[in-house]
Image: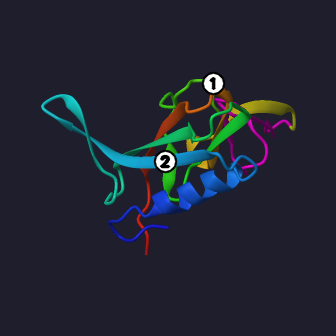
Amino acid sequence: MFAVTKVNSAKVILAILAVSLSAQAEVKVILVANKITTSNGAEVKESGQTAKAGDTIEYVAEYRNTDKTAVRNVVATLPVPAGMEYLPGTESPRTALASTDGMHFSAIPLKRTVHNAAGQPTEELVPYSEYRTLRWDLGEISGGGNKTVAARVRVVTQGP
């Protein structure tokens, strides 16, 4: 999914987002990936086309209803690409659910049951590096309206 210094995941993510709305063709998704840097103590957004391990990328997906009538039950899905790690607390709106497999979603932070040394079941937090998908229930988007979701990830590995 990555060239050595290129983040080419935007097209893949956009395709996945569009597929999730196939039953609602009047909703268009516009995805922007920006690299977040700091300059003179202020946050700066740069093109997300190139990134290296340690860089922060912010994905912003705008869901636009191009129809004149309202669209109901809109669900926004934002994959966390391989080689990236979700940064907790950066999701917007804050009502996001997360998944490690893209099928089973729960509130953030994700938890799982494991057995301790004594064989007793205990809950542990799922590492953020295992999050693969974020999802929001956007409900209704009025005719001509839009809603936006966003989250940040950190590049943790380089491609081949």
Query: What amino acid type is highlighted by mark number 1?
Result: Thr
Going 68% across and 32% down the picture, which residue do you hit?
69
Residue at point 52%, 28% (across, down): 92
Residue 14 drawn at (x, y percent) = 54, 55
Q: Secondary structure at mark 1?
A: loop
Q: Find the residue positioned furthest to the bottom.
A: 160
In the image, is 37 to the left or to the right of 21? left
Judging by the rendered image, the residue that carries numbered circle 1 is 95
Tag 2, which secondary structure? strand
Nearer to us in this view, 116 or 93: 93
Mark 2 or 1 closer to N-term? 2
Residue 30 circle label: 2
Q: Is residue 114 visible?
A: yes
- Direction front: furthest residue: 68
Picture coordinates of residue 138, whole percent (x, y): 66, 30
Q: Quadrant of residue 51?
A: bottom left
| Residue beneath the point at 56% across and 39% down | 63
Q: Is residue 100 magenta?
A: yes
* Residue 115 showing in the rendered view: no
Mark 1 crowdedness (10 Å alpha carbons): few <14, some 14-19, many ≥20: few
**The C terminus is located in which quarter?**
bottom left
Instruction: Answer left or right for 75 relative to 15.
Output: right
Q: In the rendered structure, which amino acid carries the disc numbered 2? A: Ile
Q: Who is closer to the viewer here, 130 or 33?
A: 33
50 on left or right of 57: left
Mark sitting on residue 103: none
Give the image quarter of residue 136.
Answer: top right
Residue 102 painted magenta: yes
- What is the spatial separation of the Cα atoms under label 2 and label 1, in whole angstroms? 20 Å
Instruction: Identify which residue is drawn at 36% across, 56% down.
Output: 53
Image: magenta residue range: 97-118
Q: Is 90 placed above or below 12 here? A: above
